[in-house]
Image: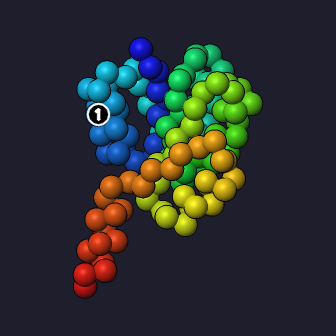
Amino acid sequence: MIRILLAEDEDAMRAHLTRALENAGYEVKAVDRGTEALPLLEEYHFDLLLSDIVMPEMDGIELAQRCAEISPNTRVMFITGFAAVSLKASRETPRAKVLSKPERMFEEQAAASL
């Protein structure tokens, strides 16, 4: 079974992603900040780190860099609602994929139609 470590500071998004991933058959451990994810990366094996980029205490980019040191075989994927941040992240961590949070796309679309 694929094990995913989810780092997401927004409670609703974390709960939704955890539920969706578990329903899809993945084992998920969810935390609300990067500093909480580090000890888990040291203690357990995860196939994927799915991390928000903008979080308190430690952002997702720093978390991904630390993950590469601690657990180099863990793949990294970012989720973010900020397009400019996602472009910066993809340049700084070329092995990572970046997904946009869906609600941000709808917010942008609604603002454009005004």
Q: How many numbered marks appear?
A: 1
107 is higher (above) or lower (below) than 45: below
Task: Residue 36 in the image: state x and y as whole percent.
Answer: 57, 33
Give the x, y percent position of residue 72: 69, 27
Could you tell whether 17 is left or right of 60 in the image?
left
Q: Residue at x 70, y 33 (%)?
A: 68
Q: Which residue appears farthest toward the bottom when viewing the image?
A: 114
Q: Is residue 32 shown left or right of residue 44?
A: left
Q: Which residue is mark 1?
A: 20
Q: Few, some or many C-alpha atoms within 10 Å of disc 1 (few <14, some 14-19, many ≥20)?
A: few
Pick whichever, 105 or 66, lies toward us: 105
**Render colour scheme:** rainbow
In the rendered image, which quarter is residue 103 located in?
Answer: bottom left
**What residue lies at 36% left-to-right and 62% top-to-bottom?**
104
Q: Position of residue 107 (x, y in %)?
A: 31, 68
- Identify whether 32 is placed above or below 47: below
Q: Residue at x 29, y 34 (%)?
A: 20
Q: Position of residue 16 (x, y in %)?
A: 29, 40
Location of residue 88 with respect to 52 vertically, above or below: below
Residue 58 can be seen, yes or no: no
| Amino acid type, residue under disc 1 in the picture | Ala
Q: Quadrant of the N terminus?
A: top left
Position of residue 4 relative to residue 66, above or below, is: above
